[in-house]
Image (cartoon, rainbow, N blue to C red):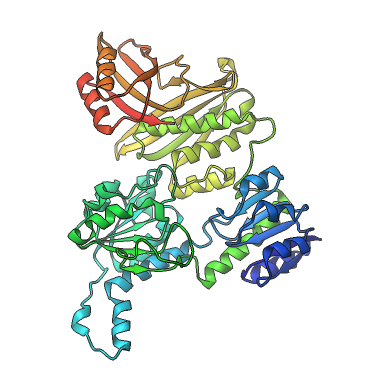
Amino acid sequence: MKKVLIPTKLNAVARETLEAHGGYNVVQDESSDLRSLASEHSDAHALIVRSEKVTAEIIDAMPSLKVVIRAGAGYNTIDTRYARSRNIDVMNTPGANANAVAEEVIALMLADARHVIPADESTRSGKWEKKNFMGKEITGKTVGIVGFGAIGQLVAKRLAGFEVKVLAYDPFLSAERARDLGATSAELTEIFEKCDYISLHMPENDETRGIINKTLFARMKNGATIINCARAGILNEDDLRSLKADKGIRFLNDVYPKDEAGDKPIADIADIMLPHLGASTVEANWNAAHRSATQLMGYDDKGIASYVVNRDVPMGLDKAYSELAFALAHACRGIAGGNKQMKLIETSFYGDLANFGDWLLVQIVAALSDGFDRSLGFDAALDYLKEMGVEYFNRDADTSKGYGNSITVDVTTSVDASLFQRISVRGTVAEGNMMISRINDFDKLYFEPIGTCVIFIYKDRPGVIGQIGRALADAGLNISDMRNPHDPSGENSLALMRISEKADCEVIDKIAEQIDALHASCITF
């Protein structure tokens, strides 16, 4: 029998489910130190944890360990890199706490709207300050949901009974899928301008860190409420502090840089603060425990690894092609404008890469959406596409084209209800370096997708490259590499340039206006 160690307070359903399977010996001990438990149970096959720190020392103490399962979504407390070096898979159970977080959002909205916390304190002290606690109703208000994945969608569903208008922002969400879920797709700026309540449900990464900032706060309606039950880093606290009083913004918060006791820097601006209670429900604990058990059984019995978060590059695949798939999709996203709604993803994997199409799709989806982790599996990617209403089609590669080991990624975005835009990018790896070989009809580029690049498409005529170069120089930007091909018709030209640092939107817009560009974008790889 395989030994499973559960060194945490986890619902008994995990142990019961595994024991009912018949192939597991489960040891659950929430009171002992993990270090000592790891030494005592060095023969453990699997480890199921919640927020416990799984360090290299813990891993080394269990030489038979094959899989670590985080009963929850976040796995930053697990040394996933070291686990991989020991050929140990790390899994999580995303979505198990989605409803708990969604209900917490509603609880915060109601508690603040009706002054539940201060009214309770006042009444307990013997006062009767009814006039001081005039509240407001949620019914009929406009609610913005920033990030419309599993949690955001459940927030919209839970709000349905309040007869609110829901605006949803998610770059990866199709407008049709949003409508199916009772929401209207909207841009981020529109949400901050129109909504009475704004609930944040974005992951924190390089793309989203600090994205909720002064520019957006300045657009908020006076007296509007912002709720953060996602990640602390997506919101710029200093920017909120500078505008909160003038605009009468209400701020309800459940997330912090670190989950620990001590003073919190947002205490002066948070109207309600909770100690990261989003997943703290009996039901969420049951869900995470049950998912942990069923995923372990599927992993052992059927080799299902959908939620492994530290999978290395598959045997036989050069890691450079993994990075290429991510870079090509990232280029599509940048050319599309970064935040356009996705309708369709199409791929072609040429040569030996046809054997790794499932794995490479994960990298493509992760590049196109901040809400999907590139360390997950193919089944998780398909589930995510379905959840967001995005179609996927992998074409049979035409081997007669002689492209060798190369990848084509096509993305169709919805510009509005009647207009669609298609971006197609092909690339390969040459001498260990990624190369973009084609963007739409502009072929034979052989451009390395690194650093920051600007792209301009314009009606071909003399002098345009000089105009672009002068404008970039005036902005203090140097060109280090460039391609300037024509399309097959000879009417249009592409200026693809690597520049010294990211260009401000104002600079790109100014150049586009000067050269009457058909397209202009700036992409940082």
Residue 304 visible, this angle? no
Of the 4 image quadrants, the one containing the C terminus is: top left
Residue 487 visible, this angle? yes
Q: Using residue 99 as the reference point, say whether residue 112 is left or right of it.
A: left
Residue 247 in percent (x, y) is at: 19, 59
Q: Residue at x 62, y 22 (%)?
A: 351
Q: From the viewer's perspective, is residue 233 above or below residue 459?
A: below
Residue 244 in percent (x, y) is at: 23, 59
Viewer-proximal residue, 291 or 431? 431
Q: Using residue 43 as the reference point, say whether residue 420 is left or right of it.
A: left
Viewer-proximal residue, 212 or 198? 212
Q: From the viewer's perspective, is residue 230 above or below residue 275?
A: above
Residue 491 in percent (x, y) is at: 30, 12
Q: Quadrant of residue 93?
A: bottom right
Q: Using residue 252 as the reference point, say whether residue 310 is left or right of it.
A: right
Q: Residue at x 37, y 36 (%)?
A: 413
Q: From the viewer's perspective, is residue 361 above or below residue 491?
A: below
Give the farthest residue toward the right.
1
Viewer-proximal residue, 462 or 164? 462
Give the farthest residue toward the top.
462
Number of labels in the image equals 0
Q: Residue at x 24, y 23 (%)?
A: 511
Residue 160 in percent (x, y) is at: 34, 64
